[in-house]
């Protein structure tokens, strides 16, 4: 019985979001903010003619107002930039997956504090959607198409990051198709010898 209680305590401890700003990173007075654009493919595969038609992204409700956005929050001094992005995405959206190469860096103004922040977003190819996560009772999450996300996301810098993601995934798909074509041409060439 004691084992079950310890196990439950560990689960509860992992369901608590970090709070406070004592570990927050700042650069030239600007708070450093990191997050992810969680994505998946509707059919589970990226082998489609149009990436944007098959791509779904996960948005969450804003904690301090109306509207939807991608999970993000303060990058803390005891973590790497990718660890911070993963942590924020887990805490706010309840998903886990593979963090990919940074989409970019944006400077934006906080709507509540009127100060400039530096924002960094990463793609997160989602592998696991959790039933329980730290901010489950504070936020709604919703999978939607790229077009729906563009319409509902109120932050311009996040829309720009979404466009970078779509372009990158479309380029990756095109590269994959070109490689397949050259492989079959290469193979074809050898068979004629």
Image (cartoon, helix red, strand yellow):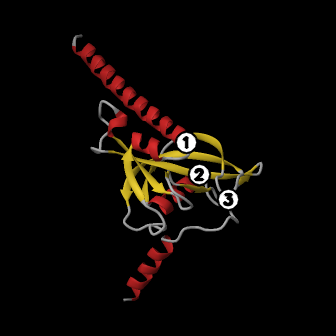
Q: Nearer the viewer, residue 144 or 67?
A: 67
Q: Residue at x 40, y 43 (%)?
A: 148
Query: In the current view of this chain or complex, which residue is farthest to the left?
Result: 192
Q: Residue at x 51, y 57 (%)?
A: 66
Contact, mark 1 vs mark 2 (Cβ under 8 Å): no
- Residue 42: x percent and y percent? 30, 45
In this picture, residue 64 sits left or right of residue 170: right
| Disc 1 to disc 2, C-alpha distance | 10 Å
Disc sitting over residue 32 in the figure = none
Name above or below for residue 63 compared with residue 54: below
Query: In the current view of this chain or complex, which residue is farthest to the bottom?
Result: 1
Q: Which residue is mark 3?
A: 77
Q: Nearer the viewer, residue 139 or 99?
A: 139
- Residue 60: x percent and y percent? 46, 56
Q: Which residue is mark 1?
A: 102
Q: Residue at x 49, y 71 (%)?
A: 14
In this picture, residue 15 sits left or right of residue 84: left
- Residue 162: x percent and y percent? 48, 40
Disc sitting over residue 34 in the figure = 2
Q: Secondary structure beneath disc 2?
A: strand
Query: In the current view of this chain or complex, which residue is farthest to the right?
Result: 28
- Residue 192: x percent and y percent? 22, 11
| Disc 3 to disc 2, C-alpha distance | 12 Å
In this picture, residue 188 sits left or right of residue 84: left
On-image quarter of the C terminus:
top left
């Amino acid at each position: 019985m004691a084992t079950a209680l310890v196990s439950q305590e560990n689960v509860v401890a992992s369901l608590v979001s970090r709070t406070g700003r004592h570990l927050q990173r700042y650069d030239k007075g600007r708070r450093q903010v990191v997050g992810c654009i969680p994505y998946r493919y509707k059919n589970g595969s990226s082998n489609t003619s149009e990436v944007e038609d098959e791509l779904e992204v996960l948005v969450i409700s804003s904690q301090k107002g109306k509207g939807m956005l991608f999970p993000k929050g303060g990058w803390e001094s005891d973590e790497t930039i990718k660890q911070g992005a993963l942590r924020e995405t887990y805490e706010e959206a309840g998903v886990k997956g593979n963090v990919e190469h940074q989409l970019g860096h944006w400077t934006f103004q906080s709507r509540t504090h009127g100060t400039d922040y530096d924002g960094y977003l990463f793609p997160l190819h989602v592998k696991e959607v959790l039933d329980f996560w730290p901010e489950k009772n504070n936020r709604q999450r919703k999978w939607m198409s790229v077009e729906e996300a563009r319409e509902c996301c109120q932050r311009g810098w996040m829309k720009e990051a979404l466009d970078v993601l779509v372009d990158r995934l479309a380029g990756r798909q095109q590269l994959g198709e070109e490689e397949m074509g050259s492989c079959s041409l290469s193979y074809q060439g050898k068979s004629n010898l």
